[in-house]
Image: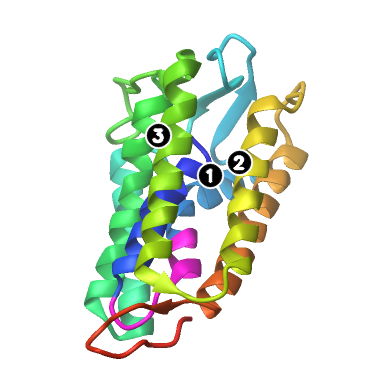
Amino acid sequence: MFIGHFAPAFVAAAVSPERPRLATMFVAAQLVDWGFFALAAFGIEHMRIDPKASVMVPFDLYDMPYTHSLLGTAIWAAAMLGIIAVRERSLITGALAGVVVLSHWLLDWLVHVPDLTIDGTPPKLGLGLWNFPWIAVPLELGLTAAAFAFYLRRTRGPAGPPLVLGGVLLAFQLVNWLAPHPDSAGLFVYLQALIAFAVLTVLAAWVGENRWFRKRGGLALSAR
């Protein structure tokens, strides 16, 4: 799953206290993937290209105990909770960010072939919807579209920034699905993923700066 991970981010930003912190929640949504590709670049976690890995995604994610085990994801979530709670002086905002981080593992469990773990050791888990595109494609698009619509309903502001973000999300997802895949995993693949996450986070920050809650205690509060 790629853009589907941002569905919890849109929901959390729409219900967060005081301001719709969309960029923060976008980082939370892909935090463990930020971690995975960074660790893979240093040879700490590993993947390889295997066209037989699944029908939709030729990535054999065979070694990712620190980021994509449930225990590892929970540690990343706890760290995110603490950092955001202190930075924003809001335990609620921190908790929302932590939940968004945790949601990554659950959403991955739906689509991944068995490559996830509880604590980095077997058994490996995954429902494997990547082998059923007729389920995985509408699921990913539907989750993202529904959460995006919820965010727009809960906030107000110019239409341009969120439409640009939505268009880039869709374009990135189509590239992810339809573009030729690399022959082998390596630094270029890892940097490509990290750059894509960075671009989406910058766009989310731009959207958040231009959105306000429709109603919150009778006042519309500025976004960040």
The residue that appears at 54% across and 37% down in the rendered structure is 45
Circle 1 sits on which residue? Answer: 36
Left or right of 45, for residue 136? left
> What whole-number distance in Å separates the C-alpha atoms at marks 2 and 1?
6 Å
Mark 2, secondary structure of its residue? helix
The residue that appears at 58% across and 53% down in the rendered structure is 166
Left or right of 122, for residue 194? right
Magenta stretch containing residue 24, yes or no?
Answer: yes
Q: Amino acid at mark 3?
A: Asp
Name the foreground residue: 223 vs 119.
223
Circle 2 sits on which residue? Answer: 40
Q: Amino acid at mark 1?
A: Phe
Name the foreground residue: 172 vs 112.
172
The percent coordinates of residue 199 (x first, y second) are 67, 59
> What whole-number distance in Å separates the C-alpha atoms at marks 3 and 2?
18 Å
The residue that appears at 52% across and 27% down in the rendered structure is 61
Residues drawn in magenta: 17-27
Mark 3, secondary structure of its residue? helix
Name the foreground residue: 194 vs 1.
1
- Per the rendering, the mark at residue 108 is 3
Would you place residue 105 above or below residue 194 in this image?
A: above
Q: Are marks 3 and 2 in contact (CB under 8 Å)?
A: no
